[in-house]
Amino acid sequence: MGAALFVVLERELEGVDSSMDGKALSRAIEALDQVAREQGVRPLSEFFSIDPDEAAAFLEDEGADPDEMELPELRQFSAEEGLTTVRALMLQPAGQAEGVLEDLLECQRLLSQAAEAGIGWHFEVDY
């Protein structure tokens, strides 16, 4: 099955389907991050965050005690900054690989709508 990256908007937007596949993006993240650095934009992996309550539930499911750890705060990022990265990657060969371009287009769609609404976002990983 594999991991998938997906965009989480700061809040739901009426009429916006926020689902995306994200598997190709997950498989190509290291190459995409390298290209982002070369292009002088923020790498996609730097947009990761998770709600501390969700992180605690995940850790409990894995047999760890979240009370023994300091979980980071949820971070939201600027949709405009995410769009800058996504658009830069779409122009590069690594961003045009099979499946990756489709995932980047979905990111662009969601981040454009977030920018219009003036809300933040972050990436999460689904396993």
Image (cartoon, rainbow, N blue to C red):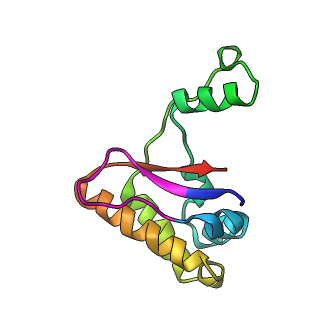
Residue 111, picture quadrant: bottom left
The answer to which of 94 and 12 lies nearer the viewer is 12
Residue 55 in the figure: left or right of residue 113: right
- Residue 122, given in percent of the width and then of the height, sits at 48, 49
- Residue 74, given in percent of the width and then of the height, sits at 49, 35
* Total numbered labels: 0
Q: Which residue in the rendered view is the most extreme toward the top?
A: 67
Residue 59, picture quadrant: top right
The answer to which of 40 and 28 lies nearer the viewer is 28
The answer to which of 31 and 59 lies nearer the viewer is 59
49 versus 71 height, above or below? below
- Residue 31, given in percent of the width and then of the height, sits at 71, 70
Q: Which residue corresponds to the image point at 59% horizontal and 73% vertical from the top-left? A: 39
Residue 28 in the figure: left or right of residue 71: right
Q: Which residue corresponds to the image point at 60% horizontal and 32% vertical from the top-left? A: 55
Q: Which residue corresponds to the image point at 36% horizontal and 48% vertical from the top-left? A: 120
The answer to which of 27 and 94 lies nearer the viewer is 27
57 versus 35 height, above or below? above
71 versus 10 height, above or below? above
Main secondary structure along the magenta-highlighted residues: loop
Could you tell me which quadrant the N terminus lies in? bottom right
- Residue 73, given in percent of the width and then of the height, sits at 51, 30
44 versus 94 height, above or below? above
Magenta stretch: give its range. 6-20
Q: Residue 118 in magenta?
A: no
Residue 95 in the figure: left or right of residue 11: right
